[in-house]
Amino acid sequence: MNIFRFAGDMTHLTSILVLLLKIYATKSCSGVSRKTQELYALVFLTRYLDLFTEFVSVYNTVMKIVFIGSSLAIVWCMRAHRVVRRSYDKELDTFRHHFLIAASFALALLLNEKFTIVEVVHC
């Protein structure tokens, strides 16, 4: 295994755990962009579609599941947790993420190796 990949994965995992612990400990998502967290979840869900078709290693599979699960857990907390969702300030989260998603999808339709659903969504 590449030591740099491992270090990157552990750093990313640590940052996710710190964010989740902060949200659960304070029962607040103040200062966290829900739109950014939704984009992270969307990226992981689409990027790791190969989880169902290809097996690389146990480590790779576990990390993909952890990244998807943790991203969805953060979004769930911000949208559905009865206490945490009250601390979300929609007025401060003004990024127009729909434009980014539409532009990314359009580019994925144009720039791909083979025109399949998995390839287009994976781009």
Image (cartoon, rainbow, N blue to C red):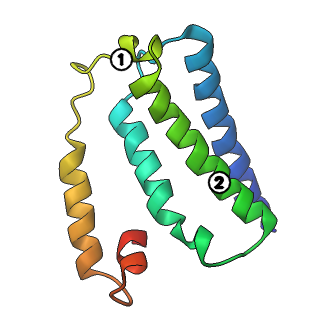
60 displayed left or right of 27: right
Disc 1 packing (10 Å; few <14; some 14–19; many ≥20) = some
Q: Which residue is mark 2?
A: 65
- Residue closer to the observer: 64 or 111: 64
The vertical placement of 2 against 40, above or below, is below
Q: Residue at x 24, y 72 (%)?
A: 107
88 displayed left or right of 2: left
Disc 2 packing (10 Å; few <14; some 14–19; many ≥20) = some
Residue 68 image position (x, y, % from top left): 56, 50
* Most distant residue in the bottom direction: 114
- Residue closer to the observer: 82 or 109: 82
Question: What's the CA distance linking mark 1 and mark 2?
Answer: 26 Å
Query: Which kind of residue does numbered mark 2 sit on?
Result: Ile
Are the two marked residues, 1 and 2, in contact with CB atoms closer than 8 angstroms?
A: no
The vertical placement of 4 against 54, above or below, is above
The vertical placement of 5 against 119, above or below, is above
Residue 27 image position (x, y, % from top left): 53, 11
Q: Which residue is mark 1?
A: 88
Helix, strand or loop under label 1: loop
Among the 4 quarters of the image, the one containing residue 4: bottom right
Q: Residue at x 37, y 31 (%)?
A: 34
